[in-house]
Amino acid sequence: MASERSDGHVPLAVKILVAGGFGVGKTTLVSAVSEIRPLQTEEVLTNAGVGIDDVNGVEGKRTTTVAMDFGRISINQDIVLYLFGTPGQDRFWFLWDELALGALGAVVLADTRRLNDCFPSVDYFERRNTPFLVAVNCFDGVQKHSATQISRALDLDPEVPVVLCDARDRRSVKDVLIALVEHVMTLKQVAA
């Protein structure tokens, strides 16, 4: 819950999901922006995952989220975002329905080296009518693509924003979260 200030003001608490494929940078994104020490449920990848976890493109990955990541960031004095990073592997998707309860919206983090990995997340939020945007994690040395190219490649509805970001950079991640809140507010105004 959002904490009450000394003047009695309680900011609006907003739940945001951070989703995407295995190894896309969800844990990194939550950690980069959280103003508290983030809760992480990281476990070491083992031989049991060989043939199950596709590490192509993320060969250096040594751990994986097995339940969720959790962080918090105050956007301003009136809005506090609670971030819930979802696990990326199919075998942990049973957790998604619980994590999605009460969420205002979602960030689908995409890696252009493995763009197909974000289709399940996009499909999930479309089926649930959960507002979302796609944030393309721009890694060093990886070919850059425009937001329009990504939108076309993912066959997104025109109103779904696509933003470029660096999941390691606090300012970049904060901009993504602000874009999501603005997107949700626009959708609510249109529906009214």
Image (cartoon, grey):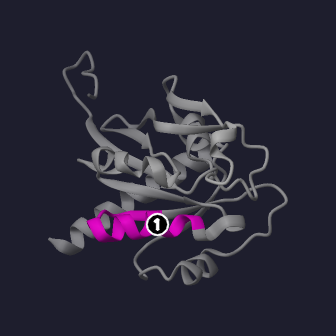
Residue at image coords 46%, 56%: 107
Label 1 Cα neighbours within 10 Å, binned few <14 / some 14-19 / many ≥20? some
Viewer-proximal residue among 53 and 130: 53
The structure residue drawn at horizontal position 59% and vertical position 71%, both measured from the top left corner, is 116
Q: Quadrant of residue 127?
A: bottom left
Taking the magenta stretch, the answer to whether it contains residue 90 is: no
Q: Residue furthest right?
A: 141
Magenta segment boundaries in residue numbering = 117-133
Determine which residue is flagged by label 1: 120
Q: Is residue 48 above or below residue 161?
A: above
Give the percent coordinates (x, y) of residue 129: 27, 68
Q: Residue at x 51, y 30 (%)?
A: 41
User: As displayed, is residue 56 above or below residue 30?
Assistant: below
Main SS category, magenta section? helix
Amino acid bearing label 1: Pro
> Compared to 131, does 86 lie above or below?
above
- Relative to 61, is 31 above or below? above
Relative to the observer, which residue lies in front, 66 or 47?
47
Occupied quadrant, residue 154: bottom right
